[in-house]
Image: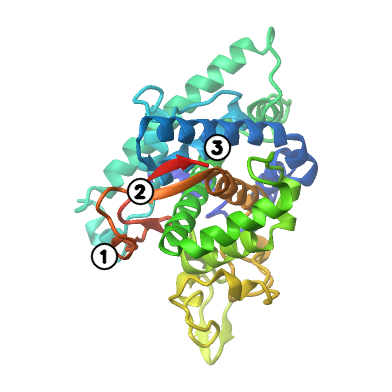
Amino acid sequence: MSNEHNKYSMVWLPVKDQWRKLRRICKEQMFSMPMLHASWDLRLEKLQKLGNYVNRCSINGQAVNIGEAAFITSLNLLSSTIFSVELAEFNSDCSQEFKNVVWGVMECLGSPNIADYFPLLKCCDPQGISRRTKFYLEKFFAIVDVIIDQRLQSRGTTVKNDILEALLDLNQKPEPGLSRDDIKHLLLDLFVAGTDTTSSTVEWAMAELLCNPNEIIRARNEFKGVIGMNGLIQESVISRLPYLQAVGKETFRLHPAAPLLPHKADANVEINGYMIPKNAKILVNVWASGRDSNTWSSPESFMPERFLDRKTDFRGQDFELIPFGSGRRLCLGFPLAYRMVHLMLATLLCNFEWKLEEGLKLEELDMSEKFGLTLQKAIPLKAFPIKL
């Protein structure tokens, strides 16, 4: 892979000292419960900006690209947390470079590459995937290098309380806990894993709900009964919204953001009569397990109510639903992703009615999937919001 990201990324590193160190840093600086509680005001600000943007579209009679709006919200939350700046704007061609680069990286990394199956083709790169991957990675690292250099120059006069500052503190120690390359590749992991996964889940949930209007009414009535319409959305409310949580789980089941989870066998192991050799690369098909008729009734149907009486954990304990992985490789960011998916859905559902583009009927809404690093809608969901 270009720029040797496979040698630095937590996704590909073996479970050894460097992997543990990076996981510990991420947990301590971003994903621990105290850190998540402390950063609530930042999430609330991004949610309010999302609501304001959708409201402007409602006033102007403009359709909202649900996936892109959720992506920009997720991207700005991460960039504000990491760099103390927003790097994208709603419905604007300005300040979009970083968004386009992150999207480009994800598209390249998720594209099936025939050269992976026929190594002799790697030198000619028949699909151009390696060239495009190198282009976007170099652009990403160039942007990050500028931000790091600017921060290093201003450290003597300005103090920032963000992730970059904490990472640079580790880098500046006599025996640095992190090299500059470590920092850049860690940031790439965070942006790739923390943006499109959340936004694609929100987009799929909204698409399924638009195809099932009664489910929207049920979710909205639940929200109204708990805090009232136009009430202030708080994270503590999520636990009191079982139907909204069920919508989230059903979306995780039908449309897992990461349809294939990579693993590697540390030793020879026999599973159900099959011998898995040491060092074999294993892809766990989360998408297929979520549609297994032996486990789920009417597996192709969107039925959130199936989770109201079913005590299924999605954090790696119940293997029929593992959208965030399981075991030591469990996604570190799932507490933040879980919050943002439900909070964005609440923002979109409880403040607005939604209508499809003119002339498009519910049964005509394209629900086809585009497989890649994340499971995206092949045709982006666009709908007109109507302020309640």
- How packed mark 1 is, by other alpha carbons closer than 10 Å (few <14, some 14-19, many 20 or more), is few
Q: Residue at x 23, y 51 (%)?
A: 125
Whether residue 282 is visible to the viewer of this picture, yes or no, is no
Q: Are marks 2 and 3 in contact (CB under 8 Å)?
A: no
SS at badge 1: loop
Q: Residue at x 37, y 35 (%)?
A: 100
Label 1 belongs to which residue?
118
Query: Which is more toward the observer, 353 or 18?
Result: 353
The numbered mark at residue 187 is 3
Question: What's under tag 2, amino acid-wise?
Answer: Glu
Location of residue 239 (image quadrant): bottom right
- How packed mark 3 is, by other alpha carbons closer than 10 Å (few <14, some 14-19, many 20 or more), is many
Which x, y percent locates residue 131? 27, 42
Which x, y percent locates residue 181? 54, 34
Q: Residue at x 58, y 37 (%)?
A: 182
SS at badge 3: helix
Distance of mark 2 from mark 1, alpha carbons?
Answer: 21 Å
